[in-house]
C-alpha cells in the first residue's frame, strides 16, 4: 500500500464581510455577467475508496500562491508578456461560482484573464507534489467556467515521471486538453499516467492563446477536489469494472453448446464514470442525444473481457431472467462497443446501439460476433443518455453460441420462396413464405430479408443497387414470412406488377445515413461476395375497383361504379368511361409506374356513363394508373401507353 496524502479543512467558515470583499474584487472576477448560485451540482463524479487514493486535496485550504507552495505545489507563470493584475493562481471567487463540495464557498483555486496583459497568451502551471506513481494511475479533478461564458477557456494536463517541476523540462508529456464547461456545473476530468515514477508529478495547465483583458479567448476557471487514484493494478478503479484495466472476466459464458443462452451478472452502473481509460473511437453508433446519434457521448461505462474461441456468438444485455433483477437499468437502454487488443491500444470491432430484441419501450444491445480463437476482447457497455436522462441500474450479460456459416460456405441459400396468390385484389392480403434458408453468420450485420422490385432480380449479388429495387423488409436473424395488405395504408408500392424475392446476406455494413442502428435491409451496404438472392416471384397488386381474373362476372354492371380505359394499349388518346350512380365533381389523376403524378384535372360528371379522354401523345411508353375520386369513392385502373 502506498502512502496516502490527504489535505482537507473541515468546518472552516468565512464571515459574510470577507465573502463580500472577495465578490467585489474585479481583478479576480469574470468577464461574463454572473447569476449567483449556491448549487454545487457536478457530473462525472464518484467518491473513491480510501485504499485507492494516493493523493487528495479538497482545496478548502487557502489557495494563494504561498499557501499552495506550503502544501507542496509549484506555481509557474509562462505566459507571453508581463504578468497581469492577478497572481498565476488565486483563491476562488464565490461571486463567480461557489466551490464543488459546498463546504467553503471560495474553497477552490482559480485563474482568469488578468493573468496576462493585453492579448497575450496565458500559460499558468499548477504542479502537484511529487508522488509514487504507477502506469495507469489516474489524476482527476473538477473544473468549471462561468455559466454561459462565450470565452473558450481551456486546460491541459501534463505528466513528468522524473519529478522535475520546471515547465521547461523535456520530460513533460501532455495527457490531454479540454475546453472548460460553461454549464454552471462542476465537471470531473480523468487522465491516465502513461509511465511509472517514484517522484512523478502531474500538472494542471491553464493555457489560452489570445487571452488577457483585450483578448477574446479567456475568462475565468476554477479547479476543485484534486485526486490521484491507483490504477486497476492497485485496486484503484473508481468503482468495480469502471476501467478497461479492471474489466470483469466473462469467459464463463463463452464456449457452451450451440443455441444455449448463458447469463452472467448482475452489474450496476449507478456510479460508473467515463474518461479514465475509455477510448475516443469505436462508439460512433451510440444514439445520443435523442436517438438520432447526432452527438454520441459516453456516460457511465463498465468494462468486460473475454477470449475468443473461434465461434460465433450473440451477445446481449437483459434483466437477468426469472426472476428479473431489481433496479433493472432504465428502459433496458444500453449501448456497447467491442474492441480487440489491450487497454490503451484498442481496435474497434463492433458498435451496437439497439439489438434485434429492442422494442418501442425497451432498448437493450444485442449483436453477433464471429470471434477469433485466442484473441482478447474488451466490451464497453454504457447507459444511454436521452437528453440528459441517464439510464442507470442493474443488468446482466447473456451470450448464446450460434451455428457458424462463413461467407462462401457450402449450403448458404435464401431458401425456397412461395406466395399465396399471384394476383391480389384490393384489401386482400399477400403472404410471402420461405423454407430452407441458411444465413451467413459473418460480419457486423447478417440476416434474412424480403426484397421488392419492379423487375426480376433472381440471383443478383448486388440487389440493393439494381435500378428496379423498390424496397424491402426488416433485418431478421432468421428466415421469416411476410404479409402485405393490399390497401391504401398497407401497400406502400401502389397497384402494379412487382417481384418479391428472398435474400440472405453476411458481412454487411451499416450505411452511414440514418437510422442508426439500421432497421431495414436498405439501411445496409451489402457485400456482393456474401449476398445470396433467391428466385423472384411475380405478383400483381390490384387497384381499388379492379379485380383479379376469376372467369366469373361476380359484380353486376348495374351495381358497379368504376372506370374503363381504352384502346388497349393506348397510343395517343386515352379514352375512359366513368360510370357513376350520381352526379358529382371528379378529381382525375394519372401516375406513372413509380408513383409520380403526370396529369391531374377536376371535372363535373353526371349520373351514369361519362365518356372522357386524355391526350397521352407526349408521354413516354410504359405503365400508368388513372385514379378518379368522386363522392362515391376512389376508382383506379391501369393502362399501358405504347
Image (tube, helix red, strand yellow):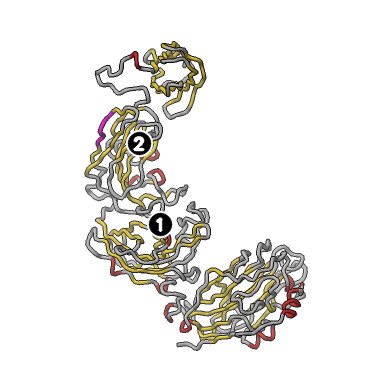
Q: Quadrant of the C terminus?
A: top left
Q: Which mark is residue 452?
A: 2
Local crowd size for mark 2, using a 10 Å CA cut-off: few (<14), some (14–19), many (≥20): many
Q: Position of residue 62 (x, y in %)?
A: 67, 83
Q: Are marks 1 and 2 in contact (CB under 8 Å)?
A: no
Which residue appears at 35% of the width and 42% of the height? 473
Q: Residue furthest front?
A: 582
What residue would you read off at disc 1?
352
Q: Quadrant of the N terminus?
A: bottom left
Residue 327 occupies which quadrant of the picture? Answer: bottom left
Q: Is residue 82 visible?
A: no
Q: Does residue 459 sit above or below 242 in this rendering? A: above
Main secondary structure of the magenta stretch: loop
Q: Nearer the viewer, residue 314 or 464?
A: 314
Residue 326 occupies which quadrant of the picture? Answer: bottom left
The range drawn in magenta is 418-422
Q: Position of residue 58 (x, y in %)?
A: 59, 80
Which residue appears at 73% of the width and 71% of the height? 29
Local crowd size for mark 1, using a 10 Å CA cut-off: few (<14), some (14–19), many (≥20): many
| Label 1 secondary element | strand
Q: Does residue 25 sit above or below 569 in this rendering? A: below
Q: Position of residue 481 (x, y in %)?
A: 28, 41
Q: Earlier along the polypeptide chain: callout 1 or callout 2? A: 1
Which residue appears at 25% of the width and 33% of the height? 420
Amino acid at each position: 500500500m502506498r502512502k496516502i496524502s490527504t489535505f482537507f479543512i473541515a468546518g472552516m467558515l468565512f464571515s459574510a464581510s470577507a465573502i463580500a470583499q472577495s465578490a467585489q474584487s474585479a481583478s479576480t472576477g469574470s468577464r461574463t455577467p454572473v447569476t449567483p448560485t449556491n448549487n454545487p451540482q457536478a457530473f462525472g463524479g464518484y467518491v473513491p475508496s480510501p485504499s485507492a487514493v494516493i493523493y487528495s486535496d479538497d482545496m478548502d485550504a487557502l489557495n494563494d500562491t504561498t499557501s499552495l507552495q506550503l502544501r507542496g505545489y509549484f506555481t509557474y507563470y509562462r505566459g507571453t508578456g508581463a504578468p497581469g493584475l492577478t497572481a498565476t493562481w488565486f483563491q476562488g471567487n464565490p461571486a463567480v461560482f461557489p466551490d464543488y463540495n459546498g463546504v467553503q464557498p471560495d474553497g477552490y483555486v482559480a485563474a482568469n484573464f488578468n493573468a496576462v496583459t493585453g492579448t497575450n497568451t496565458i500559460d499558468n502551471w499548477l504542479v502537484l507534489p511529487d508522488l509514487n506513481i504507477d502506469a495507469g494511475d489516474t489524476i482527476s479533478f473538477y473544473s468549471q467556467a462561468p455559466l454561459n461564458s462565450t470565452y473558450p477557456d481551456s486546460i491541459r494536463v501534463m505528466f513528468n515521471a522524473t519529478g522535475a517541476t520546471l515547465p521547461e523540462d523535456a520530460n513533460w508529456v501532455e495527457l490531454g486538453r479540454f475546453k472548460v464547461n460553461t454549464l454552471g456545473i462542476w465537471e470531473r476530468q480523468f487522465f491516465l499516467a502513461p509511465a511509472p515514477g517514484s517522484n512523478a508529478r502531474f500538472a494542471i495547465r491553464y493555457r489560452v492563446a489570445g487571452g488577457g483583458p483585450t483578448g477574446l479567448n479567456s475568462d475565468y476557471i476554477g479547479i476543485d477536489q484534486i485526486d490521484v487514484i491507483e490504477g486497476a493494478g492497485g485496486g484503484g478503479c473508481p468503482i468495480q469494472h469502471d476501467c478497461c484495466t479492471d474489466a470483469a472476466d466473462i469467459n464463463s459464458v463463452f464456449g457452451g453448446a450451440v443455441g444455449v443462452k448463458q447469463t452472467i451478472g448482475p452489474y450496476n452502473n449507478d456510479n460508473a464514470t467515463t474518461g479514465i481509460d475509455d477510448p475516443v473511437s469505436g462508439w460512433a453508433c451510440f444514439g445520443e442525444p435523442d436517438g438520432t446519434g447526432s452527438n454520441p457521448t459516453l456516460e457511465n461505462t463498465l468494462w468486460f473481457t473475454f477470449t475468443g474461441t473461434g465461434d460465433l456468438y450473440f451477445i446481449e444485455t437483459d434483466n437477468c431472467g426469472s426472476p428479473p433483477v431489481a433496479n433493472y437499468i432504465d428502459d433496458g437502454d444500453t449501448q456497447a462497443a467491442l474492441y480487440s487488443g489491450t487497454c490503451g491500444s484498442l481496435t474497434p470491432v463492433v458498435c451496437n446501439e439497439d439489438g434485434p430484441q429492442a422494442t418501442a419501450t425497451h432498448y437493450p444491445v444485442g449483436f453477433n460476433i464471429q470471434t477469433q480463437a485466442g484473441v482478447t476482447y474488451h466490451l464497453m457497455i454504457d447507459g444511454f443518455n436521452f437528453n440528459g436522462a441517464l439510464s442507470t441500474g442493474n443488468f446482466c450479460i447473456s451470450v448464446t453460441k450460434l451455428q457458424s456459416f462463413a461467407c462462401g460456405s457450402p449450403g448458404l441459400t435464401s431458401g425456397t420462396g412461395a406466395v399465396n396468390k399471384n394476383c391480389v385484389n384490393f384489401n386482400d392480403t399477400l403472404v410471402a413464405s420461405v423454407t430452407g434458408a441458411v444465413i451467413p453468420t459473418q460480419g457486423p450485420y447478417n440476416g434474412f430479408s424480403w426484397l421488392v422490385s419492379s423487375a426480376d432480380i433472381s440471383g443478383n449479388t448486388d440487389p440493393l443497387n439494381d435500378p428496379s429495387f423498390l424496397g424491402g423488409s426488416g433485418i431478421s436473424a432468421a428466415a421469416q414470412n411476410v404479409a402485405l395488405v393490399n390497401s391504401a395504408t398497407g401497400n406502400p408500392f401502389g397497384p402494379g406488377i412487382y417481384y418479391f424475392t428472398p435474400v440472405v446476406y453476411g458481412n454487411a455494413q451499416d450505411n452511414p445515413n440514418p437510422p442508426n442502428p439500421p432497421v431495414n435491409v436498405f439501411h445496409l451496404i451489402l457485400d456482393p461476395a456474401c449476398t445470396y438472392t433467391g428466385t423472384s416471384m411475380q405478383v400483381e397488386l390490384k387497384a381499388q375497383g379492379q379485380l383479379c381474373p376469376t372467369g366469373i362476372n361476380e359484380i353486376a354492371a348495374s351495381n358497379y361504379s368504376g372506370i374503363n380505359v381504352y384502346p388497349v394499349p393506348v397510343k395517343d388518346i386515352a379514352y375512359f368511361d366513368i360510370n357513376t350512380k350520381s352526379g358529382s365533381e371528379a378529381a382525375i389523376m394519372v401516375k406513372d409506374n413509380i408513383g409520380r403524378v403526370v396529369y391531374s384535372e377536376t371535372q363535373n360528371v353526371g349520373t351514369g356513363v361519362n365518356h372522357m379522354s386524355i391526350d397521352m401523345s407526349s408521354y413516354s411508353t410504359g405503365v400508368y394508373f388513372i385514379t378518379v375520386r368522386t363522392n362515391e369513392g376512389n376508382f383506379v385502373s391501369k393502362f399501358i401507353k405504347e
